[in-house]
Amino acid sequence: MTRDDTTIDRRSLLKKTAVAGVTTGLAAGSASATGGDRPSRAIERDEAARLVESYGSDLLALLADENVLDAGDVTELATGRPASPDAPLRGDEGAALVDSGVNPARLVVVTQVTDGTLRLSVEPETGKSYALLDDGRSVTVFNPEVGTLDEDATTQTDHCTQQICPTDDGACYASSSVTYDGDRVATQASCCSYYKCTDP
């Protein structure tokens, strides 16, 4: 066996270790979930910033190029605000780890920017990053792999769960896949207002 055959890529190993730690934490947090629990948990500022920097650097650059963020720096995001479990649904500022059990677990950071509400997500397991900007009239998707997409260019599919939304109508939490040209380019939290939660 040559030396090259046994060389370990340290960065790759560190990323795999970080992914394992995050996904294990998410799994532990959702393993005891009941029908009324929310599919997210709070995250410390340093961990949130580290995940965004590790998996979202290209996305931050894209958001700066598109004038959504000034400098494309993690300090412009609300990573230090404690987020309630419902924050990704309501658009409250803050960071939370979200695991619906449908789409890959992700860190979601909700930040109010000049043009509206920015929901930035990074998925440690897949390495994907994307952001959705809601200006009150439409939602624009930013994804480093495909660029900037208007709402008309994408399709959204809701995957309803048995987790109750923070609404009074009995709606269920949904992990909504946003697709472009057949590929998932983003995931967002929403409520299935047309689908009432019942005991599984």
Image: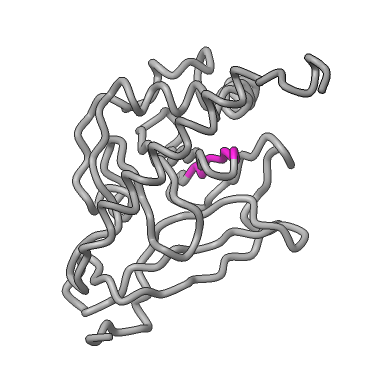
Q: Quadrant of residue 175?
A: bottom left
Residue at coordinates 34% horizontally, 26% vertically from top-left? 47
Q: Residue 138, position in %: x, y?
A: 52, 52
Vertical relation: 150 (above or below) 63: below
In the image, which residues are magenta?
127-133
From the viewer's side, name the closer residue of 189 and 152. Answer: 189
Quarter of the picture containing the N terminus is top right
Examine the residues drawn in magenta and state their main secondary structure: strand
Residue at coordinates 41% horizontally, 75% vertically from top-left? 160
Image-based side of 80 in relation to 150, left or right: left
From the viewer's side, name the closer residue of 91 and 164. Answer: 164
Image-based side of 13 in relation to 195, left or right: right
Vertical relation: 138 (above or below) 114: below
From the viewer's side, name the closer residue of 84 and 35. Answer: 35
Q: Residue 114, position in %: x, y?
A: 42, 28
Membership of 130 in magenta stretch: yes
Q: Residue 79, position in %: x, y?
A: 32, 27
Residue at coordinates 29% horizontally, 58% vertically from top-left? 39
Residue at coordinates 44% horizontally, 38% vertically from top-left? 118
Q: Return the residue found at the far front.
A: 1
Q: Residue 163, position in %: x, y?
A: 27, 71
